[in-house]
Amino acid sequence: MTVLLTIQQLSITLQDNVVLSELDLSLNKGEILGLVGASGCGKTTLLNAIAGFSKPSHGKIVIDELTLSDNNSCVPAENRQVGMIFQDYALFPHLTVQENIAFGISKLSKAEQDKQINDLLTILKLEEYSNSYIHQLSGGQQQRVAIARALAPKPKLLLLDEPFSNIDARLRNELMVEIRQLLKQFDMTAIFVTHNKDEVFTFADKMAVMAQGKLLQFDAPSVICQQPNSYQVADFLQLGSWLPCQLDATGAQSLLGLLDVDTVSIEQQDFAYLLVKPAQLLLDTEVAENHKANAQVDYISVTEQGYHYYLSSLESSVPDQTLSFNKLSLYSDSVLSLKQQVSVSVKAHDFLFFQK
Amino acid sequence: MIALYNSKTWKLSSYIIALVLTVPVLVMLVGGISASTQLFSHLWQTVLPTYLENTLLLAFLVVLLALIFGVFSAAIITQTNLIFKKQLRWLLLLPLAMPAYLVAYLYTDLFDYAGPVQRSLRAWFGWQAPSDYWFFDIRTLPGAALMLALVLFPYIYMLTRGAFEQQDQNLIRASRLLGLTAKQSFFKVALPLARPAIAVAASLVLMETLADFATVQYFAVNTLTTAIYDTWLGYGDLGAANALASVLMLLVLFVVLAEQRSRAGLRHQSARPNLSRELIQLSFSQQVIGSIFCWTLVIFGFLLPLTLLIVMAVQYSDVAQLSMLMSTGVNSLKISVIAATVAVLIALSLGLYQRLHSDKYRQFPLQISGFGYAIPGTVLAMAMLSTLGPLDHWLNDIAEFLGFAPPGLILSGSLFAIIFALVVRFSAIANGTIISGIKQIPQSLDYAPASLGVNLTGSLTKVHLPILTPAILVAWLLVFVEAMKELPAVLLLRPFNFETLSSQIYQLISDEMLEQGALGAILIVLFGLLPIVLLNKSKEKV
């Protein structure tokens, strides 16, 4: 696989605020990268820096062996061969669909332009709208025009700024699958920004999690999902809930009992949070006879995977306040009531401990 | 995001344009203030106190009357079920198209001792002499104030009406739920909420009054503007005229600052203006009083003067008048078309500079280029004379030094000075319209062309300018109409024997011969209607 995009030590300071800090990243040709993080974490700034709309204060951006920006020079946006799909699509209201698509390819001959426009209109199922104006189209159609317009000049890299945020939730999944297939069909390398992790899991080959201008983790979504590298990553992606534990030679002591952990692998930490995914928390149904209650139900909601409960530790049973927990997620088909005391246990697995 | 472009030529030219537009007034202010304390003390001991007193008294009366006319009519139209209010809603805007000096002349003609009204009264009651009865004298300071208020009150009406209509109806509803009647809630909630808009409108009226020249000159009320005119054209004293102009300029600046001060923090944003409002139901007698009030304003502010003009035009129009109209009309067109085009080009250049350039202070050229609107035409004319005059002398000296024939007063004595003054005065109108057009373009459209490989020129010609076309047309039209109507600057700056429609009509009015120019006057009124139609249309859209 050939590397298409390399970003080295990229830093951006805007009005004395460090928005991006020493960021490294590389992307292979044809890959789709999903950039997630909370609002203001710098993901849109990174997109703007790649597109040429934001000037890096330090670092280097290289696309296809061409340096777009380093400490000395900065290629203007119009010469970068980087396409962009804007959050509001930025379609030109005074031009028709066809004219919008033709906008970036005016240097081609008329025949070539027509061919390319017609191809794109067909692929994106927009033939019948070619002479319509933008305000005559639905949101989904507008997005397809934005995609066609961005693809027409054959950019090396396509940037998408929260492309699905304006789309109806029901349509969103369908559209994501459709656009992913389209990008793959064009062998297009793409980066898209979102604050919705589910979009990344559906849409991206690679995932980058950002916080406060820094890249926390960069890998395949499945890897990050299985092996988040920090508390922030797991917490932002809501991969599970948190159980405080005291670690010692015997294992991990928690209010849900002693967990059999190979303490050698947990280095020198004595206090840590265990990431508990929903499938790893078990409800011990027969509380009264075999088990002592260790949690109570604080909140109940109904989901497609059965009932979803938030559990908290029982106050009376807490010898050590630091180990008390709340908002521990439990999915179960059993019907429980609010304040009901239950006994739960953590299934043995490759325990993941983190410190805040 | 950063602004996209950093062209040095663009930056340099933007600052030069802004500077050129500002320099004349600065030169005049510096000249006026530093001229000589002797001159000032002389003026202060002789005429200045009277001029100032008249100016301030006139301003006070005009604002007072315009507030009474404007606020009450806006309240009646928006808050009550007055009959014919749909028609009155736009009819009340029309007086804005009537130049005050026309109304002044027509009413003097009508109500003077020799006018038809007093003649009929005398015939009716058998009076013989002025001592037999009392009749108000219109050619006085209060008369001038009334004339100005009659045509300026629509500013207050328009902005106050807008404020009432944009008010969050839930605030009104809340006050009703708390036990207020519709009338009480108007006085306790709606009116206080509209105060910022009323203040803005009143300061507009104030500025227009300070700038008025022709009405007060015709009524022989000595204010600062007439004093400047007389001092320069009557006595040829540029220094004293400059000093008076500087005093007027400072007065206007004071109004502008006071207005901005009072406005700060007094904005009421409305979330739900479109909820239906409950109207105050008028009794029969209230309907009659309300109708008389509104229709009197429409009739005396617009319909009657226009009718008088039409009657005059029908009675006195002849071929000579038509040919005069043609030649002055062409002159007016010439300067207005050039001024409008230049002002729009400058507004576009500076507006897009503010939007797209990476200069940290990119809003600066646009901001300072628009300050001329507050400056009365008379002051601006003095500024041009005191800047371009010396510049002409300097050019002639250089020409002579180089062995060429001296070119004469190519700047101060030509159309250049008039057009320059018009551009300075009306740039703010073009700027405002173009900027509100630019603001409606989403920022992402600035970036989209670059992401498609298109450079600045392509982006401007293919995206920004086409989208801005309606704003450009409106801006052009507004400046064009204002330039057609402008009088004092043209009077002071026009080359020998050069007449525009407005200067011609003013001359005829001074000579008590408006009949000769009735057609031209109608034309000016009709041009004046254009921006009102445009304004009303854009208000309807909101």
Image (tube, coloured by chain):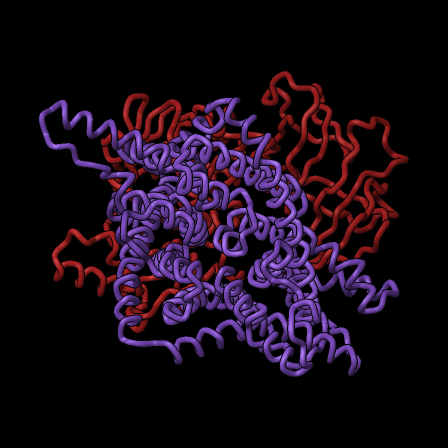
Task: From the viewer's perspective, tell me whether residue B465 is left or right of residue B39.
Answer: left
A86 or B341: nearer the viewer:
B341
Image quarter of residue B468: bottom left
Residue that extends furthest to the top in the rendered view of this protein: A268
Q: Is residue A148 visible?
A: no
Task: From the viewer's perspective, tell me whether residue B104 is left or right of residue B399.
Answer: right
Residue at x 38%, y 22% (from the top left corner):
A58
Numbered circles on residues, count: 0
Where does residue B225 sit, x and y in percent of width and height?
50, 44
A278 or B269: nearer the viewer:
B269
Where does residue B532 sit, x and y in percent of width and height?
48, 65
Residue at x 69%, y 67% (from the top left corner):
B131
Q: The C terminus of chain B appears in which quarter of the rendering? A: bottom right
Where does residue A45 sit, x and y in percent of width and height?
44, 36
Of all chains in the rendering, the one displayed in red is A
The hue used for chain B is purple
Q: Is residue B353 visible?
A: yes
Residue at x 68%, y 55% (from the top left corner):
B64
In the rendered view, tell whether residue A107 sits above or below residue B157.
above
